[in-house]
Image (cartoon, helix red, strand yellow):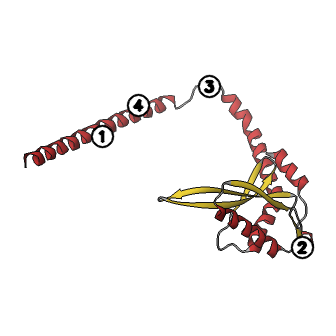
Amino acid sequence: MIPRLQNDIARREPTRGEAFRLVRKDREMTERDKAGQWLLSQARLAAKSGEKGKWTLGRIGGFEILCETWRTRFDGEERWDATLGLVLDGRILGMDFDRETSPVGLVSRIENALLRFEAELADARRQVEEAERKLPGYRARVGLAFPEAALLQEKREAMAALEADLAADTQRREEVEKAALEDQTVIVEAA
């Protein structure tokens, strides 16, 4: 993770103030509002098209902006959704949006994501340091008996007994329901 974040930091281009630009195939957009409006419209059009796919819409801050569409089904209803993402080193960072998202709000999310790399790198380094600090303690315990092994075995046996009781109870309930259904069938046939 650390090398990927370092690569992202090295690849990042400034976007503050006048440096902002959305680079498309055919032109550059330097106004945040218009760039965000175009990105949102492209994502919404892609969802309306009803086709599954991924498209590169352009670049912001040195990173590709990807649009992806997919079909979902909920409660028998089918619909198409779209998402936008920043293509980083070895991962895609999704940029959530909905009907309420403003064009400038979307661009702000993208720019804020680009500015978080250093914080993510610091967190990753802290995690590595913490793991390295704990490692000798873990290595010292390799091969030692688990001090709570007897209690663990007791709990496993109790769990197995509970599961057996539950299975027997379920089987008894199913037999009662089956017998009641057979009785109803006999009554209906007799009538």
Foreground disc of the pair 3, 4: 4
How many C-alpha atoms fall within 10 Å of the one at disc 4: few (<14), some, or many (≥20)?
few
Q: Look at label 3 and name its amino acid.
A: Leu
Q: CA distance from mark 1 to mark 2?
A: 67 Å
Q: Which label sits on residue 144? A: 3
> Which residue: 57% across, 56% down?
72
Report the front residue among 98 and 6: 98
> Which residue: 75% across, 73% down?
103
Q: CA distance from mark 3 to mark 4?
A: 23 Å
- Left or right of residue 158: residue 113: right
Q: Look at label 4 and name its amino acid.
A: Glu
Please identify the quarter of the rendering in which residue 112 is found.
Answer: bottom right
Foreground disc of the pair 4, 1: 1
> Which comes before the other along the chain, label 4 or label 2?
2
Q: Which label sits on residue 139? A: none
Please identify the quarter of the rendering in which residue 106 is found.
Answer: bottom right
- Left or right of residue 167: residue 188: left
Looking at the picture, how far across and down is residue 158, in whole percent?
39, 34
Q: Look at label 2 and name its amino acid.
A: Gly
Foreground disc of the pair 3, 1: 1
Quadrant where the N terminus sits is top right
Q: Which label sits on residue 157? A: 4
Foreground disc of the pair 4, 2: 2
Q: Which residue is mark 1?
A: 170
Q: Which residue is mark 2?
A: 17
Q: How many numbered discs, if any?
A: 4
